[in-house]
Image (cartoon, rainbow, N blue to C red):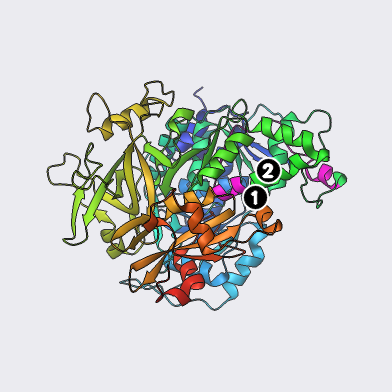
Amino acid sequence: MGSTVPSLTLPRLPLFEAISQHNPKSTAVVHCLSGRSFTYGELLPDIYRARERLYDAAGRTNIEGERVAFLVENSYDYVVTFLAILAARAVALPLSPPFPAPELQYIISHAEALLLVHSPKFAAKVNEVLSTAWPEASPNPNPKVVEIPKHMGVSSSSSSNTGSPYYEAVSLSEGSDAGQAAMMLYTSGTTNRPKGVLIPESALTAQSSALKQAWRYTPEDRLLHVLPLHHIHGTVNAVITPLLAGSTIEFLFPFNADAVWRRFANPFLEADPAAPAATNGSVNGNDAADKFANMRREKITFFTVVPTVYTRLISTHKLLEQSPATARFAEACRKAVSPEHMRVSISGSAALPTPVKRAWKELSLGNVLLERYGMTEVGMALSCGLDFGDRIDGSVGWPLPGVQARLVETDEETNTATVILPGEETDPVTGKERQGEIQLRGANVFSEYWRNPAATAKEFVPADPQDPDQRRWFKTGDVAVRRPVPESAVARGVSKSGDWVTAATAAAAGGATTNNNTMYFILGRQSADIIKSGGEKVSALEVEREMLSLPEVSECAVLAVPSGKWGQKVGAVVILDGEFVAGGGSWKPMDMRRALKGRLANYKIPQILRVVDNIPRNAMGKINKKELVKAVFSDDFSGDEL
């Protein structure tokens, strides 16, 4: 008799193929606090069943290219729902639970979603969205009548945890064509209404494959996931790539410093495994024992978050060290995040202040944070290497595998654009570094802004007619310099980061046998971080790094303040260090100028200063500088005080 063909079938997408080849008994997803776990053997059958439920809710078995919005907490159910949408060759549209109903309505209606999927936790939120007056049709060239989407709930999955060797067989026999499978994420909309960024399955595969190669994810990795999932960072870096590699993902959301430290330290707590991670007296021993009773004890090897998370972890660890009751626990935390146990710690989505990087290195007994650069439209594009010697302060490294990058300098008087070629990073006349916009191309780049061909066309540049590679270049809107870094490990010929770094540096040298070892340094957004004051260009990120190195400063944002005399003035919004304030310290503009003298050129030192108690940030730690400058400096728009 012939072999039985499995009745469960899915398309042969690269991610599904990788999942099918992982050890079915190995753990794919863990819910950190409850300890519930799910194996790779359970994943594909659950994806199949979830896809069938999507078909039932839609009333048809072909929803290719249709947008399916979903509101599901960080969990195994999120992973299954997301991948089921891709399995249906539809467009996955993750929604953010904290968004107000009108904002969710805008996204759902603009995307013309066919279905709205939700977990039981968000049933009330979905009812609010659907019961509120629905908006007018989104402003498309050929608008359709906005229809309230069909909606369906997902039932919470229960982990088997039975140790059974049997897993349902799933055949990848529906062909390898992903069709119109994609993910769509909406931009933050700081200048206009949010735009839908359509990221095809091929781009998701390219992005995750590049990260797997550069950061060496393996089945032995265990990633603690504390990020939001309606962003590229949380989805590609911390879900798709670990699944591609067979790693384990532990969800712990929302971020809580006490819980994160407890999870890090848990494998290293021997005498008292129920010791609390409390730093403020809010968690007593019994409560902590209950809260963390089911927490796993395998060590965390991989952690990728935003700079504000590291800042919070550093500050809470100081409190742990200061209390005799938690001093041993603090030592277990240090051991857990040391290079011996945590293979890689990554910082991204916002600029990493150098003092935070140094403080983490000291706390972690030598672990150097890895910086990288990416955005919604391209995933991760540049990265420093795994070798500590390839993690240079302020740099985001080199183009990742499969990514091409260039810097384009624009002459504002003639409005002409010039590519800054390798070896031409310094202006021969002025001796200054040449700044340029980062432009990118590769299989990682998104396909279009949804229903917005004008915006799509505006952000792309066609290739030079003589370029054998005729793919267009994406204009990131970020300004950078390329700078030779002779102290890097790759420049010294001792790098252990991998062949991709060698290839990237050779490409930066125009394919020369001897590369010029230049690394990218981000200066900031063209629209918000490049301040044009009195004919000079000032990088807000450079000024912020210097200000954050001052002991008086806890947080800061450097802004472009409109000025009739200078065009723009450099303004600084500062949160002072708590210990400095507690000791009776105060900080005035002249104090700031004296502290920065010798660190920055005079024209870069902020001309106006505001000390505040809070600087608003979004879920990824980013500051909306256009809103902040209006909120804080509106009275200074016409003044020119020094």
Front-most of 25 and 305? 305
Whether 291 is among the magenta residues is yes
Asked whether 606 or 285 is in front, the reply is 606
Numbered range of the magenta stretch: 287-311
- Please indicate whether residue 166 sits to the left or right of residue 534 in the image: right
The quarter of the image holding the C terminus is bottom left
Is 33 covered by the magenta stretch?
no
Residue type, label 1: Phe
Which residue ends up furthest to the left in the rendered image?
A: 466
Residue 569 location (% of width, % of height): 39, 66
Q: Mark 2 near mark 1, Cβ–Cβ under 8 Å?
A: yes
Callout 2: SS? helix
Image coordinates for residue 403, horizontal then vertical, percent: 33, 39
Q: Position of residue 59 (x, y in %)?
A: 50, 60
Q: How far is the residue under mark 2 from the one under mark 1?
A: 7 Å
* Mark 2 Cα shell of 10 Å, populated few (<14), some (14-19), many (≥20): many
Q: Amino acid at mark 2?
A: Val
**Residue matched to label 2:** 260
319 over 267 or under it: above or below: below
Look at mark 1 in the image and give the residue it sits on.
255
On the picture, is 388 further left or further right than 479?
right
Residue at 16% across / 61% down in the picture? Answer: 414
Q: Secondary structure at mark 1?
A: loop
Picture quadrant of residue 195: bottom left
- The answer to whether any part of residue 86 appears in the image is yes
Left-right relation of 263 to 61: right
Quarter-wise, where is residue 450 in the image? bottom left
Question: Left or right: 2 with respect to 255?
Answer: left
Percent across and percent down for residue 408 are 25, 49
- Looking at marks 2 and 1 on the same chain, the residue that comes earlier in the sequence is marked by 1
Can residue 159 be seen from the camera position used here? no
| Mark drawn on residue 291 | none
